[in-house]
Amino acid sequence: MLDAGTGGSFLLPALNVALYPRVTALVSAIKLQGRQDEEKARHQAVAGAVRQLLAVAPPAPESHQYLQSKQARPVDLTVVPNDASGLPADSMVLIGKNWKESKELREQNKDKLVFTAGDLLVAASDINGDVQSVGTLSL
């Protein structure tokens, strides 16, 4: 509708009030979908980075200090490598030499996954057997 006084367009107040809840709901739905898409992309990126790490992580030896202290066997466990040299240059995985260095790396690289060399890795898979995440064990 045109406002004869200014030549601009406007909505009648009654129409505006009737449409507002629908427009607000639509905008909220679009924002929610965007957040869900971003979360899904982040999840896929993390899962890919974890798979890269597991591909270069050696099997855990029975002599690993954690396993010895718990009197456990290294079934399906791997060890965080000493460095990230086996990972792609653009990997989101960083590896600290000790817990102190890992802490500093986490503080400086909030968008990266930081692990500590020598920690044990426990892979977590989805129902299809695809690795989605890892947990770590350390003393």
Image (tube, grey):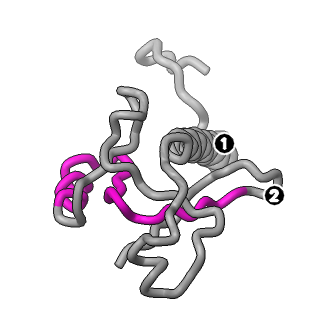
Choose between 138 and 132: the one closer to the eye.
138
For the N terminus, the quadrant is top right
Q: Residue furthest bottom?
A: 70
| Secondary structure category for the residue under label 2 | loop
Q: Residue at x 25, y 53 (%)?
A: 96
Find residue 66 and report its horizontal and vertical position in percent.
42, 77
- Rate crowding at label 1 as few (under 14), some (14 to 19) or many (20 or more) other CA atoms within 10 Å: few
The answer to whether 129 appears left or right of 116 in the picture is right
Q: Residue at x 49, y 48 (%)?
A: 57
Find residue 33 and report its horizontal and vertical position in percent.
64, 42
| Residues at marks 1 and 2, CA–CA distance in whole angstroms | 34 Å
Magenta stretch: residue 29 in it? Answer: no
Q: Amino acid at mark 1?
A: Leu
Choose between 138 and 30: the one closer to the eye.
138
Q: Residue at x 46, y 12 (%)?
A: 7
| Secondary structure category for the residue under label 1 | helix
Find residue 93 and report its horizontal and vertical position in percent.
39, 43
Please state the extent of the stretch shown in magenta in the rendering.
Answer: 101-125
Q: Which mark is residue 105?
A: none
Q: Which residue is mark 2?
A: 127
Q: Residue furthest right?
A: 128
Which corner quadrant of the image does residue 19 belong to?
top right
Find residue 71 and report its horizontal and vertical position in percent.
52, 87
For the C terminus, the quadrant is bottom left
Q: Residue at x 18, y 57 (%)?
A: 101
Q: Amino acid at mark 2?
A: Ile
- Rate crowding at label 2 as few (under 14), some (14 to 19) or many (20 or more) other CA atoms within 10 Å: few
Which corner quadrant of the image does residue 90 belong to?
top left
Magenta stretch: residue 108 in it? Answer: yes
How many numbered marks are there? Answer: 2
Q: Which residue is mark 1?
A: 26
Q: Is residue 104 above or below residue 27?
A: below
